[in-house]
Image (spheres, grey):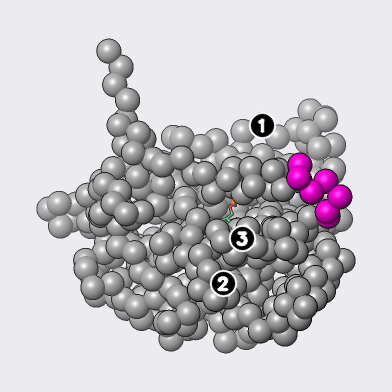
Amino acid sequence: MALVNEHFLKLQNSYLFSDIAKKVNSFKITHPKDKIIRMGIGDVTQPLPPAVIEAMHKAVDELATKETFHGYGPEQGYSFLIDAILKNDYASRGVYLEPSEVFVSDGAKSDTGNIGDMLRHDNSIGVTDPVYPVYIDSNVMSGRTGILENGKWSDVVYIPCTEENNFIPSLPDRRVDIIYLCYPNNPTGTTLSKDELKKWVNYALANNAIIMYDSAYEAYIQDTDIPHSIYEIKGAKKVAIEFRSFSKTAGFTGVRCGYTVVPKELNAFTLNGETVQLNKLWNRRQSTKFNGTSYITQRGAEAIYSPEGKKQVKETINYYMTNARIMKEGLRACGLNVYGGTNAPYLWLKTPDRLSSWKFFDKLLYEVNIVGTPGVGFGPSGEGYLRLTAFGDRNDTMEAMDRLKKWLHQ
Ligand SMILES: *Cc1c(COP(=O)(O)O)cnc(C)c1O
């Protein structure tokens, strides 16, 4: 008799996006003439940079002849891409990594979800709250989270990030072996300064903990004093795994490519206290369960590091970040409290008059026909907030702000 992994049965269905879709659909049926502006999208909307398209076309042609055909590639990624990553994303910031410390993948969701394979089920985990749901759900599947009580898992340490603490998580008061940090943050759009990040690295060093650092939105950083990589902090190579993605950086959400850095200095422990290099384990895990990202995709990713590629990527990010600025100014002019949006494509709006996330969602939908994402969908500390994204069209973004201004001044 085949028995299931019963931890899967503990998973809550995520109703967030289907609940939003239902509400939007019923609005549409009752208000067929009203134009809805969607500001809840967590996906990019601009096309791939031309340099990427060109590189991918060329790669396709290479596969068409016997001489230049590529079959299975290295599970860890082609060295042309890894070298470009090391040079452009790290050496340029004074971080020196070896090629074998970088693992190219099909994206940061898979890697942040799979990384726990290497770690025992009884490690304690900590997350900032609100949070990207993958970190929690993947730990539910491996039995690390305990039971769900009042919207919180009993064995997960939730570290609130709210207006009250300026979205700066404080160090946990309970033992935490694995900490997930995402900066710039989804959903709040906020960042951590070097000094704040240093506190976490020092905590991990002092407690032999591991930081899972998701920097999927690194390319959106505008301020010069915000760290782009956790390895800019001294000692971080001993305690941190860093996840990067080309999804939001260069429009790869449908193409699928990212990478994960597992430094050789990073160890975990056996019950007997022996140290084990996680780089070796991750290499083994990937070589066994993953057969690499396609050649075409990796050639496309390489192209974002060419001079034209860099310029094109920057233009698209500027487009989204200009949307973010228009939104932030517009929302502030309406007297709303809004966070993020300066180094990330997300704006985190405090609901007015202490409305719940869902009440405010309904109000925006019915009174100004704007769709956001209720903050409570990202965790208990998201209650009373709403996420708006800057991935929309420029004209829609401006129209949305005009509607809000008229609405609040009527
Ligand atoms: C979008 C996103 C990712 C990227 O995931 P991919 O699988 O690379 O597309 C990772 N982490 C966070 C927090 C995200 O919002």
Q: Where is residue 18 drawn, in percent x and y?
A: 59, 43
Return the mark for residue 322.
none
Task: Give the residue displayed 72% in from the left and 48% down from the top.
Answer: 27
Contact? badges 3 and 1 (CB < 8 Å): no
Earlier-in-chain disc, 1 versus 2: 1
Question: As displayed, is residue 197 above or below residue 89?
Answer: below
Bounds of the magenta span? 29-35
Return the mark for residue 351.
2
Task: Give the residue displayed 75% in from the left and 50% down from the top.
Answer: 300
Q: Where is residue 335 drawn, in percent x and y?
A: 66, 84
Amino acid marked by disc 2: Thr
Contact? badges 2 and 3 (CB < 8 Å): no
Q: Where is residue 149 drawn, in percent x and y?
A: 28, 51
How many angstroms separate mark 1 from mark 2 (CA)? 53 Å
Q: Is residue 27 visible?
A: yes
Locate residue 6 relative to residue 231 in the image: left or right.
Answer: left
Q: Quadrant of ligand 1?
A: bottom right
Comparing labels 3 and 1, the label whose residue is closer to the camera: 3
Residue 58 is inside the magenta segment: no
How many angstroms separate mark 2 from mark 3 (CA)? 9 Å
Disc 2 is placed on an element classified as loop
Residue marked by disc 3: 361
Task: Give the residue displayed 56% in from the left and 81% down from the top.
Answer: 226
Q: Is residue 322 visible?
A: no
How many angstroms separate mark 3 from mark 1 (CA)? 49 Å
Residue marked by disc 1: 71
Q: Quadrant of the N terminus?
A: top left
> Quick one: label 3, few (<14), some, or many (20+) residues within 10 Å?
many
Disc 1 is placed on an element classified as loop
Question: As displayed, is residue 178 above or below residue 229?
Answer: above
Q: Quadrant of the C terminus?
A: bottom right
